[in-house]
Image (cartoon, rainbow, N blue to C red):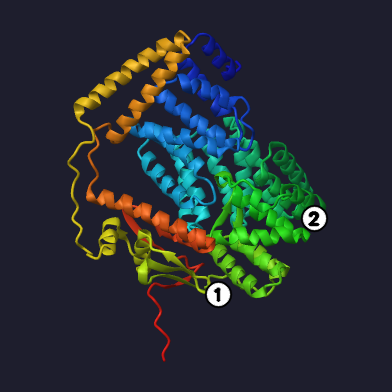
């Protein structure tokens, strides 16, 4: 018996003015109606229609679906308000399963190149949220996000933990869908470490379970694994076929990263001419014009790869400038389906092509260290085999320590009249004082030390250890007012149903505006479990103030020097507890006090 068509179900529910049925059908449409990277077509229109009529958890789930639809279609900016609403509504309802869905959507809209720290934070929160949920789908989502951020951060142990967690989840669930995701990510990792037998076995399982589950992205993931295996086997015929398929899809759907990956496959197939044609088509206005979306880093690195392979100089020069702030990153495509190397390799090859062997050697050493951290043996060997890098990387693959990267010297110290000196040696500039500079300077002076926001606040104020945690005592609004708000919300929901059924647009708009305003009041006044929110404690006030001040300071440093700002963003963690964790691949010698005057 054929499965019911969710679109026909939706249209029938709309005709019958059955709001609950419309919501259910719209959610089914979202689940089966779109593949990552494709234009969303009519789907957002239908989701919007159902969303504006829904209330309660149905509206929240539709907000999640809208966020995903826009991100999948390449418009993450349109997804932001829906993801934010979904998280806020789920928190108010204290529904852990719904909050997990909302956090997953929020991760999608924080998938840009400059949001790794926030993405890592939300992924950690998602993992905590789903830890006790029985639904395997929610836990699977958390493991996939943690796997993605672990690869981006070159955290080999976290990668292994998440792969193992997916394997165990597939055994627990027993269904095809979880088995598909576990097998496809095992295939990705097998290619990363150069185990072709394991990669082929994972491909076979992913192909079978993806078909059984009817997973929308199954075909795309199958192509990814096939291309990765062909690349390591140097199977030029298969590579050429995959290259043509990638480019046709990427250009046809307007997805730069997929077309760029196809161009790299053309190079691997020994066909530089079609690879160069794709490069010219995608970089007509420069690499800087590429959308800074979920796959921006992948797009830039792959196009630089093609430029290096086809002798195009301008994209290489521009690529160096764009990529340097992201050193220390693993390049991963959407959802950790494929690993595309470390940023340092592309920088090393670029500097070699530009005739700067010393810089090429430094970046190649760092790339080798990153691959060694991940156990990425195929990538290590590929790096050593690059003729343009001959003699720049260690000739062995053993566990010995790679050449130490050259330390950067950077300044962050206060001077007279509220002026700080900030920036790398030789390019430091005077900057007017910011509160966050004080907090940052304290963290940098105590690497790998956890300091609470209260401690940082006290130290910066000149009285370390003086802070005393005070509990909040005042409720934002009293319980009687809160009860009145909630009663009115119930009344509005009933009036909205009537206004919608009578097609009374004026009343509908007025009631929705009133409902949104009341929800905002209730949200501001209540915590996760709906209890009246009390005014923040001194510790909470310190956390918020320190986080905002540090964020402003990091943004200012990034404006002055993008590479130094990116390094600090990657290594400084904020929250109730803050820490500076130096990156051994990007060592820095910090000048935190005014240098001594030269001897007379």
Q: Is residue 252 left or right of residue 334?
A: right
Q: Position of residue 251 (x, y in %)?
A: 72, 40
Q: Residues within 10 Å of mark 2 (few under 14, many from 20)?
A: some
Q: Is residue 399 left or right of residue 128?
A: right
**Residue 577 tag number:** none
Q: Which quadrant holds residue 204? A: top right
> In the rendered image, which quarter contains the C terminus?
bottom left
Q: Which residue is mark 2?
A: 270
Label 1 residue SS = loop
In the rendered image, the vertical position of residue 239 relative to residue 565, given as above or below: above
Q: Is residue 231 visible?
A: yes
Q: Is residue 550 left or right of residue 357?
A: left
Label 2 residue SS = loop
Residue at 67% across / 63% down in the picture?
382
Q: Residue furthest front?
A: 417
| Pick the front one: 359 or 366 | 359
Q: Position of residue 48 (x, y in %)?
A: 52, 24
């Amino acid at each position: 018996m054929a499965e019911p068509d969710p679109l026909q179900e939706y249209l029938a529910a709309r005709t019958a003015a059955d709001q609950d049925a419309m919501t259910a059908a719209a959610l089914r449409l979202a689940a089966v109606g779109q593949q990552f990277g494709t234009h969303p077509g009519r789907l957002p229109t239908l989701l919007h229609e159902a969303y504006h009529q829904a209330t309660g958890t149905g509206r929240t789930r539709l907000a999640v679906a809208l966020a995903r639809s826009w991100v999948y279609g390449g418009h993450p900016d349109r997804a932001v308000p829906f993801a934010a609403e979904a998280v806020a509504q789920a928190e108010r309802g204290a529904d852990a399963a719904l909050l997990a869905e909302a956090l997953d959507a929020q991760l999608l809209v924080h998938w840009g190149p400059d949001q790794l720290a926030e993405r890592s934070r939300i992924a950690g929160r998602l993992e905590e949220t789903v830890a006790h949920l029985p639904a395997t789908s929610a836990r699977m989502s958390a493991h996939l996000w943690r796997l993605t951020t672990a690869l981006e951060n070159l955290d080999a142990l976290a990668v292994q933990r998440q792969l193992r967690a997916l394997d165990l989840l597939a055994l627990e669930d027993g269904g095809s869908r979880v088995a598909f995701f576990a097998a496809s990510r095992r295939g990705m990792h097998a290619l990363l470490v150069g185990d072709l037998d394991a990669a082929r076995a994972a491909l076979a399982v992913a192909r079978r379970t993806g078909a059984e589950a009817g997973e929308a992205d199954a075909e795309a993931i199958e192509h990814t694994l096939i291309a990765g295996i062909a690349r390591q086997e140097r199977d030029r015929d298969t590579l050429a076929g995959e290259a043509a398929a990638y480019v046709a899809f990427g250009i046809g759907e307007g997805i730069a990263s997929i077309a760029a990956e196809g161009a790299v496959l053309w190079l691997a197939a020994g066909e530089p001419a079609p690879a160069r044609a794709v490069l010219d088509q995608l970089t007509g206005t420069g690499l800087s014009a590429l959308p800074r979306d979920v796959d921006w880093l992948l797009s830039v690195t792959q196009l630089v790869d093609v430029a290096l392979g086809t002798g195009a100089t301008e994209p290489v020069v521009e690529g160096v400038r764009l990529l340097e702030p992201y050193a220390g990153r693993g390049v991963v495509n959407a959802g950790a389906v494929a690993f595309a190397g470390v940023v340092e390799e592309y920088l090393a090859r670029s500097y070699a092509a530009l005739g700067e062997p010393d810089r090429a050697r430094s970046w190649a050493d760092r790339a080798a260290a990153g691959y060694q951290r991940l156990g990425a043996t195929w990538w290590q060997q590929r790096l050593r085999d690059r003729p343009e890098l001959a003699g720049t990387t260690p000739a062995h693959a053993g566990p010995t320590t790679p050449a130490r990267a050259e330390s950067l010297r950077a300044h962050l110290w206060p001077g007279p009249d509220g002026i700080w000196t900030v920036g790398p040696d030789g390019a430091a500039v005077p900057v007017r004082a910011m509160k966050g500079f004080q907090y940052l300077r304290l963290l940098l002076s105590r690497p790998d030390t956890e300091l609470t926001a209260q401690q940082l606040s006290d130290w910066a104020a000149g009285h370390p250890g003086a802070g005393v945690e005070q509990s909040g005592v005042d409720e934002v609004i009293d319980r009687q007012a809160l009860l009145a708000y909630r009663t009115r919300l119930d009344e509005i929901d009933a009036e909205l149903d009537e206004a919608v059924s009578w097609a009374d647009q004026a009343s509908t708009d007025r009631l929705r505006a009133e409902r949104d305003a009341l929800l905002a009041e209730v949200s501001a006044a209540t915590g996760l479990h709906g209890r009246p929110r009390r005014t923040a404690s001194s510790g909470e006030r310190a956390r918020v103030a320190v986080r905002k001040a540090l964020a402003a300071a990091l943004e200012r440093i990034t404006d002055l020097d993008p590479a130094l700002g990116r390094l600090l963003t990657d290594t400084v963690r904020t929250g109730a507890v803050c820490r500076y964790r130096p990156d051994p691949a990007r060592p820095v010698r910090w000048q935190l006090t005014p240098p001594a005057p030269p001897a007379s």
